[in-house]
Amino acid sequence: MKPSTKTVMMLAVVAVAAISGLAMVTQTAAPQTRNSSNLYQELQRFQEVLNAVSRYYVEEVDNQKLINGAIGGMLETLDPHSVYIPKDQLSDVTERFEGHFYGIGIEFNIFNKIPTVVSPMPGSPADRLGLRSADQIIAIEGKSSYGFTDEQVRSRLRGAEGTTVRLTIRRGNVDEPFDVTIAREKIPITSVESTFMLEPQTGYVLISRFAKTTGDELEAALVKLEKLGMKQLILDLRGNAGGFLEQAVAVSDKFLEHGKKIVYTRGRIAQANDDFYATEPDKHPRFPLIVLMNHGSASASEIVAGAVQDWDRGLVVGETSFGKGLVQSQIGLRDGAAVRITTARYYTPSGRLIQRPYDKTLSDYYEEGWDDVDPNAPTDTSKNRPTYKTSAGRLMYGGGGITPDMQIKWPRPTQFTVDLILKRSFFEFATEFANRNRPLASDFNAFRQNWQPTEAVLADFRRKIEALKIKFDPESWNKDSDFIKLRLKSELALTLWDRQKWYEIEASGSKQIQEVLRLFPQAQKIAVMGESAGSRIMKN
């Protein structure tokens, strides 16, 4: 993939789940050159208000808090994605897109006020020393961890590479707690969360974010799946809120022929304008491709889906995506904080702007991103959406996310089942069940194919719900029966094996994924149409 020629590294991010990614980093913002006298007057007005609040407010005020609020409010008037990042949050915000951290390598939850291992990361120091799911960390460096918050645990487990941390572990079926001393190492943060063969010829790849290594991770995943006999692929971008624009280009480049435009950006300043093309050698077969989206798929995810759709490379399936087509650049401030400012809009190859309108309140903007009203629907004539054509001449609409070629709704559990998840009832039950049924861990393939929660297991789970003092709702229980059974199985897989197996059970047991599998003939047909159309992209 050809790197951007601009000195500004653009970033397509969404602030749905969190502020994310790095874009442009400088020491200070550019000096003001236009309307300087008017700006000076407005700054004087701001100073007057600040002085009045500091002098007369009923209580003593925190000036830093006031200024941070003023900066945030100022950026909020621009668009939903221009944001201020305080110094103390910047490292956490950027870490998950940097590709690694230093620690011992576990997922954990606070369970009954005790940090509890959910799963050791494969190959991590914790994994090699034998930590396993449901282990309770009752002390860290000899100090009781009872009542610790997530952040308190995280800060004590992480540290400089090569340093050690001593944990006291309580394990079911082991009489006495025991200590382990673990050396911290570099722990990779993967963006390709899951890769496996869903069927003998069907590969499945789940990308959770677009971080610095996403393109390389996807390449490794494709090579692995092709060696296993993959002839068709499901690329799952559901819930993927975005990340680095250039990594969205790298992912798209795996599927598009050399020379095809993937995305382009346009802004007010020259540095914001760029065009991105597929430049890698065509290393992978033109296998049938299905891209999965939901309302949480945004920004960089929409770049990939839009490029696949515009070039008729594959079938886009699921729900209308969030609709975030703004590009942010990050500007570092002298105090170590940063502002992330929208500097461009991005467009799909056919010229579609994916950004939804944001002329209402911020809460309306995010709520509408998750509703089931498709702003691109052709019946919505009142909004006069612009129309575009794919390379094969299929009609598309712009200005409100990516509308899938095929709509498939993903199940949304009732509030009762959401409460079961939030109160960790599935996790607690799976932990106890796994401790009583360890022989299940001997054969994952047999577990995946054959094990299902029996009526006796479901009855035990209901007793656990009652023990947790969660009010039982029979109507919701019956309505969410399939969801509950699948979640029990996937949580058990997580406890017996790891997070990868959790994803595998969730995907293989989903009725919606079974619907998706039946769409591959149509994906193949569209890919043939796109190949025949060549390089034509038309705007109507």
Image (cartoon, rainbow, N blue to C red):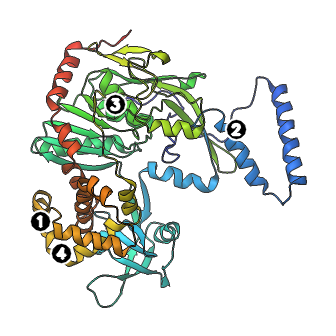
Tell me what residue is drawn at x 22 percent, y 32 percent: 289
Q: What residue type is labelled 2?
A: Met
Q: What element carries label 4?
A: helix
Q: Earlier in the sequence, mark 2 or mark 4?
A: 2
Q: Earlier in the sequence, mark 3 or mark 2?
A: 2
Side of 8 where 397 appears, left or right: left
Q: Give yes or no for contact between labels 1 and 3 (Cβ–Cβ under 8 Å).
A: no
Q: Name the residue under label 1.
A: 443
Q: Give yes or no for contact between labels 2 and 4 (Cβ–Cβ under 8 Å).
A: no
- Residue 539, relative to residue 347: is it above or below? above
Q: What residue type is labelled 4?
A: Arg
Q: Which of marks 1 and 2 is nearer the N terminus?
A: 2
For the N terminus, the image quarter is top left
Q: x, y percentage for residue 97? A: 45, 48
Q: Does the image show residue 125?
A: no
Tell me what residue is drawn at x 38 percent, y 75 percent: 182
Residue 490 is drawn in which quadrant?
Answer: bottom left
Q: Which amino acid does label 1 sit on?
A: Asp
Q: Mark 3 points at which residue?
A: 305
Bin the neighbour count of mark 3 within 10 Å (Cα to Cα): few under 14, some 14-19, many 20 and up: many
- Residue 102, relative to residue 281: is it above or below? below
Q: Name the residue under label 2.
A: 74
Q: x, y percentage for residue 249? A: 37, 32
Taking depth in this image into account, of 32 and 206 the one nearest to the observer is: 206
What whole-number distance in Å separates the C-alpha atoms at marks 1 and 3?
36 Å
Q: Give yes or no for contact between labels 3 and 4 (Cβ–Cβ under 8 Å).
A: no
Q: Earlier in the sequence, mark 1 or mark 4?
A: 4
What whole-number distance in Å separates the C-alpha atoms at marks 1 and 2?
57 Å
Q: Mark 4 points at which residue?
A: 438
